Image (spheres, rainbow, N blue to C red):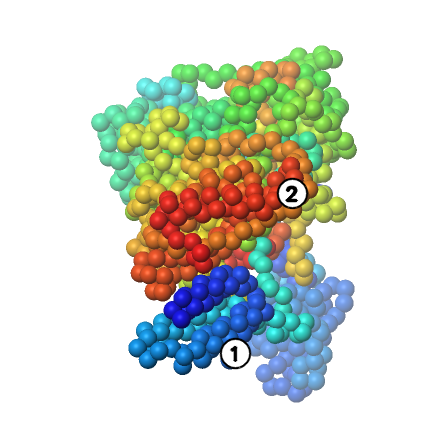
Amino acid sequence: MKISLNWLNEYIDLKDVSLDEILDKLTYAGLEVEEVDDQAANFKNIIAGYVVEAKKHPNADKLSLCKVSDGNEEFNVVCGAPNVATGQKIVFAKVGAVIPNGKFKIEKAKIRGEVSSGMICSERELNISENHEGIMVLDPSVKEGTPVSDILGLNDVIMEIAITPNRADALSHIGIARDLSALFNRPLKYPEINLSESDKKSSDLASVEIIDAVNCPRYIGKVVIDVQIKESPEWLKKRIRSIGSRPINNVVDVTNFILHEVGQPLHAFDLDKLSGNKIVVRSAGNDLKFTTLDSKERTLRPEDLMICDSKIPVAIAGVMGGENSEVTQSTKNILIESAFFNPSSVRKTAKQLGLSTDASYRFERGTDPEITVWAAQRAAGLIQETGGGQILSGEIDAYPLKLKRKETGLRFARIDKILGYHIDEKDVMAILERLGFEIKKKTDDGLTAVIPLYRHDVEREIDLIEEIARIYGYNKIPEVSKISVTLEEKVDHSAFVDKVRVVLNSLGFYEIITNSLLSDETANRFGKPVHVLNPQSSEMSHLRPSLLPGMLTTISNNLKVNEKDLQLFETGKTFEKISDSKIESFDDFTETEQLLVALTGNAVRTEWYDKDRQQDIFEMKGFVSSFIEVILPKVEFNFIASEEHSQYLEYCLSIKAAGQEIGYCGMIKKEICSLFDINQDVIVFMSDLNILKQVPVPKKSFKELLKFPKVFRDCAFVLDAGIGSERVIEVIKEHGSNLLHNVKLFDIFQSESLGSGKKSLAFQLEYYDFGGTLTEEEIEKIFTKTIKAVEQKFDAKLRGA
Amino acid sequence: MINRIDETRKSFDEDLLRVNDHASLEELRIKYLGRKGLVSQLFESLKDVSKEDKRVVGQALNQLKIHTQSRFDEVRDSLKNKDDISESIEDLSLSGRTHTIGSRHILTQTLDEIKNIFKGLGFSVYEGPELESDYNNFEALNFAEDHPARDMQDTFFVTDKFLLRTHTSPVQVRLMTDKKPPLRAIMPGKVFRNEAISAKSYCLFHQVEGLYVDTDVTFAELKGTLVAFAKQFYGQDVKYRFRASFFPFTEPSAEMDVWWQPKGKEGRWLEVLGCGMVDPNVLINVGIDPEKYTGYAFGMGVERTAMLKYGIGDIRILFDNDKRFLTQF
């Protein structure tokens, strides 16, 4: 909202206060000043000057050499304008001034051998018109030294203030002035209204009937007749322009002026266009098409509140007037509407129409039902002042639902309890009174305050405490220097995921965070997604049912910038519908925290010590094993080939621990990769973190260190190539007795020389006994038994035997 | 003779299994494939074989030669790297072998920093769902049904009663409903706003909510706690201010600004968090007596904070996950 400082000065005297102090106080009190346009600052060091003498420049035909006085001192100035002459009052930019047009700084210079200390300006240079024919010549009565901003009337400060939605009362100059009056403890002055009214009454020429009193508790009508519609006077146009609006005609400008003066939206009807000279306030009913004064046809709902004449609607209540009753150049007689509408009703109508006006903005936040009469009188007075005519006496005041001021108590001790700081009673009272609260009962312990009707945000004691605190100044309330720590149980919901991240980092994975919103098509490919009713775009209409699309998009984007070797992970929520029915409770969808780890490209790019190696499933199995060993210490787990997830996995290994699946890994199908323009293998590991988190972990306990030597035995078997190594290891372990502690596969070899369809697997077996040193015989016995078992089980042959 | 060939093959295979470095491979080569190795010796012996057996034995011998040579080559190749290294071991100027350590996303790092400061001040960490009920996100937090305050947060709706949470404040509601005071917790998480994606705004971001409810919690303590945070996070000499503001669920409400002074540019106040005393209506909604208990709450955006701290101008780069970006932090 734009607020003009000159305009504010009509209601509160702040002339002795610096601009910075005003801006700070407003901002601290919750009226945040976002931008400031200090017009006078643009004309700093630019003043009225007197041309004492103007003569031809000795070294240039087209230049003049002038002596310019600022009232105290004379300056040599070289001027190129043809119209400069001795005796003129001109606009003089002194050394140090910044010329508004072009923003260049005036410095002392030598022009064709003559010193020039300043510049005589044209209108264009001052940014006030396009005129650059010659210099701007001022009225001879202007005194030298007067700032040019005063002469031009460009001495206002325009503030852009952000008003929070609770502060409906501050949406006007008087509203801002009221806060300033409390902030500076100075009186607020309402403009006086002295109307000379005719004998005829407003109610003789018009009538008002309110049918829907709930949505229109009060409606004031006031009539002005024989008005001339014309251009507004300069002072009014200036006010309208200062807040960034365009002057239209006196009547429109007056209503606009009052809206910004006191916050009451007004509407002026052409009384002669109102059938039956009557206003009826009712819901739209069957009148569902209506053309507003911007010539647009609007579609209404039957329940939208309308201002009607005796036949048809003439305005959408609180939102916008109608074309059919608009004030035009030929209008003579005017009905001024000054009403109070139910905020929620205006909000619903405006929202439904997608139409927000200065009026609806204020009505939906809540206006002051008590200012309506004053505003109507003020409008009548100004319309007469600017357009003549007669003001009919009195107002038609339809007020079927009388709104009463409410009261609330305030305990002084409660202020201390909330703020942790004592504010003097005297200050408390002054603040409340300056803000318009009437103090009814006051005791040593507290008071009762009557709340003005423009404060829709104040109802309770706590609301008063906020008013007191924000005007007193938050920065004056000292912060505590120590706090007490309560000893209730401390919880950290994020600790597990934090650990997951750190472990993955240590394994060389970078964390990514991707968008939770996907397109319909992508989301549906990876699950049963929940969709958003009002998406920004079709690319982001569904919640992700899986972390995969985000990961694949990330890989794809990285490939485009030639980053091919990636080890990435993401943790985050995924969402799926449980059935096709509408979501009505938390049981109709799942929200789960997932982990997705991905590998792609090369594990190693050729180095002096190593050769190229691509990422593959074994790399992933290794990472997953290390990961689980840290995250779930001492928990046994294994990888089992699975047919699951075949819609996007080429092959899948399910990871089982404690009797359940805790995750799975596999390679993304080529056709899925190609959907994301990925032309290299992507290996993934996925896990539901809630499941992972709940896997029981055995308590850590110390185990005695081995005191006796370990014994190693190697063996290699030739067997069918189709036999999985893990099965062989299982059989070895099964027959290895409790002395066998480890089996390592250390070589795989396949060659025609072994026979077709055969391979050789070489194992190293590790034996030891916590109870003593093992003997050759003991080992040999078990080792031989184990070899036999493998030979029998897999029809294998021990190599080298 | 055939028996000798078979035995040699077997012993070769067995010996080969034990080869694990260049030296043992060389030993093996000398033993079998050297000029005076076992294979050569067998070829030598071929001249003693009878004419009629020569063809069969010769064939077997050739097979042995092929077998031993090819197996030897394989093992030698697999040890090649080790060879390279042992040959170049004297050049200590060679670079070390690389090992990658990944990193947490810069948003996570920033969040962790915030979390650690508050944990040090005795706060717990709670989380809550992102797909929330309208009740928890708005109603319980004192947002009236059709009050313009709802326009402050553009909302993605899933149904008329469910939505993507617009702030982490619903976790407050959950926490206060589940547990009784004293409650002191921060609640980090993802939130969503229905805004067009641009350099300045994204459809989602991360927030950290804070809450403290007990019998004697005051605005002065809220200020003290947040100032302590700002000093740890932005530096002990941070310049700050508190301004009055409006949030439906706190009263009095405030915003905290810190002075931001980029090098060589004009400084300015930047809003870093919103805060206030928990509105009595919120306490009533969760069944806590506002006469007995008071509380404060605050919330800050992680993206904004991280962007400020690391000089990131465009929020979108945070969600592009370009490796060249990820590896910077």
Subunit bearing disc 2: A
Query: Which residue in the protein does label 1 denote?
Result: B36
Residue B168 percent across, percent down from the top left:
52, 34
Between A661 and A162, the one lying in front of the other is A661
Name the residue located 44 percent from the left edge and 42 percent from the top edge. Answer: A730
Amino acid found under the numbered disc labelled 2: Thr
**Residue A259 seen by the camera:** no
Q: Which quarter of the picture shows residue A256?
A: top left
Q: Amino acid at mark 1?
A: Lys
Q: Residue at x 71, y 30 (%)?
A: B220
The C terminus of chain A appears in which quarter of the rendering? Answer: bottom left
Label 1 resides on the chain identified as B
How far from the left and from the top, in percent, is residue A525? 30, 45
Give me the residue at 63% from left, 63% from top.
A140
Whether residue A792 is visible to the viewer of this picture, yes or no, is: yes
Q: Examine the rendered structure and indicate whether residue A617 appears above or below residue A209.
A: below
Circle 2 sits on which residue? A773
Of residues A481 and A411, which is closer to you in this image?
A481
SS category of the residue bearing label 2: loop
